[in-house]
Image (cartoon, grey):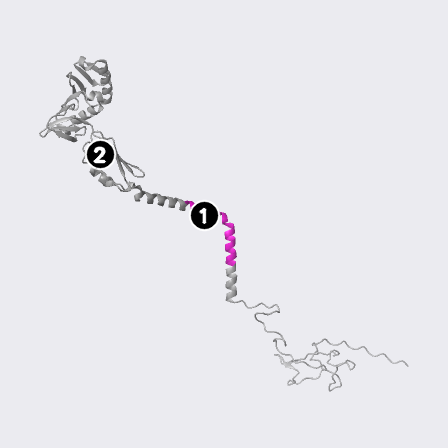
């Protein structure tokens, strides 16, 4: 008779998943060193050997089985411990080789920030090189201009441009040597520093000088251009005969009248309107006609009369208005009819010259 085939074995339970609540599994005491009490009071067991059945029984044919009280084999229990480093593992920290992030200190952060700033400055310099070159060029030009200006000013105000020669231009009645001698105090002074007030004070002592102008000719010459006063005649005073110009400035005084200078007979003196009209008339006359005048009379600004010496010819001028036109017409008429042939020339009307 044939033996019946054995029943199929139940599947082996997974490792570490043995059901501790199975009725066939023997109970464990709470003080078993192979158990760990969890927070819920239940003991967990870990099966490390194969062949454990789902009910906690071990196949008798499975190797490594441990016999129990009921003749079944159970797997050894490994106690569970809390989380912690594995045996032989290196502690986490700086210098780890297991891929963990190392600790970063203040020095490392400072070095990284400094390197970043250097890189940023290098980029800025690279992109602003043309602007910096243009700025340097303009700074060089400005510095050159400043240096040139300072050098020019320093040279101008230094003794290198001191006055060594004084030239007088326009002096006819006043000796030029006297004027240069009066300005000798300016010798050695730099041309830009010539004291104009001192020059004016020195030239005031020459009544014949009406106006003057100073001209600097580097490196060492000072030119004085003067305009002399034009005498118009003599006025009889208690001190004698005073030579005056058109402004009434007394130029000189002599006891007797000077030859070739007309005698002025003017009502009201040098401060009157008649005198100012005479001055305008005498200044408008051509030099050749003015040299022939020996007397001038005027009681008002509108009745100026000139007398020509030698022929006793009179020139009725009238007022000082249009004196330039009157002088031109008089010169033409005197050329056509000389004073020796006429008694008087009337130019009181500029457009018409009446000859008697």
Q: Residue 5: give x, y in percent of width and height.
A: 85, 78
Looking at this view, is 176 or 133 the one in front? Answer: 176
* Quadrant that contains the C terminus: top left
Dominant secondary-structure state across the stretch colored magenta: helix
Farthest residue, direction left: 238
- Residue 304 seen anywhere in this rendered image of the structure: no
Q: Is residue 102 left or right of residue 275?
A: right
Q: Which residue is mark 1?
A: 136
**Quadrant in which residue 205 is drawn:** top left
Q: Is residue 110 above or below residue 132?
A: below
Q: Nearer the viewer, mark 1 or mark 2?
A: 2
Tag 1 and tag 2, C-beta contact below 8 Å: no
Q: Could you tell me residue 222's position as x and y percent? A: 28, 37
291 magenta-colored: no
In this rendering, the answer to whether 280 lies above or below 196 is above
Q: Is residue 123 above or below residue 109?
A: above
Range of magenta residues: 116-141
From the image, tell me which residue sits under label 2.
Answer: 177
């Amino acid at each position: 008779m044939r033996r019946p085939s054995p029943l199929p074995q139940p599947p082996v339970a997974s490792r570490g998943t043995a059901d501790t609540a199975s009725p066939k599994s023997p109970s464990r005491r709470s003080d078993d060193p192979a158990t760990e009490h969890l927070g819920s009071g239940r003991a967990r067991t870990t099966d490390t050997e194969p062949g454990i059945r789902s009910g906690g029984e071990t196949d008798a044919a499975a190797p490594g089985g441990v016999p129990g009280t009921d003749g079944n084999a159970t797997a050894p229990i490994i106690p569970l411990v809390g989380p912690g480093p594995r045996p032989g593992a290196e502690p986490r920290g700086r210098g780890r080789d297991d891929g963990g992030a190392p600790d970063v200190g203040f020095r490392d952060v400072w070095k990284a920030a400094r390197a970043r700033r250097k890189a940023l400055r290098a980029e800025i310099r690279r992109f602003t090189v043309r602007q910096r070159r243009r700025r340097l060029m303009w700074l060089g030009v400005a510095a050159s201009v400043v240096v040139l200006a300072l050098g020019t000013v320093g040279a101008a105000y230094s003794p290198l441009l001191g006055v060594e020669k004084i030239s007088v231009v326009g002096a006819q009645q006043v000796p030029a040597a006297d004027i240069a001698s009066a300005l000798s105090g300016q010798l050695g002074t730099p041309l830009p520093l010539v004291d104009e007030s001192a020059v004016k004070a020195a030239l005031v002592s020459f009544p014949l000088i009406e106006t003057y102008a100073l001209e600097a000719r580097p490196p060492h010459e000072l030119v004085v251009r003067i305009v002399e006063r034009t005498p118009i005649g003599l006025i009889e005073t208690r001190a004698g005969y005073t030579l005056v110009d058109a402004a009434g400035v007394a130029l000189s005084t002599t006891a007797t009248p000077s030859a070739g200078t007309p005698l002025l007979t003017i009502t009201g003196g040098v401060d009157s309107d008649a005198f100012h009209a005479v001055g305008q008339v005498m200044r408008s006359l051509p030099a050749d006609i003015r040299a022939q005048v020996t007397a001038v009379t005027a009681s008002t600004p509108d009745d100026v009369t000139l007398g020509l010496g030698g022929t006793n010819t009179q020139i009725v001028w009238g007022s000082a208005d249009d004196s330039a036109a009157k002088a031109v017409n008089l010169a033409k008429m005197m050329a056509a009819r000389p004073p020796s042939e006429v008694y008087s020339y009337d130019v009181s009307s500029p457009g018409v010259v009446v000859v008697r």
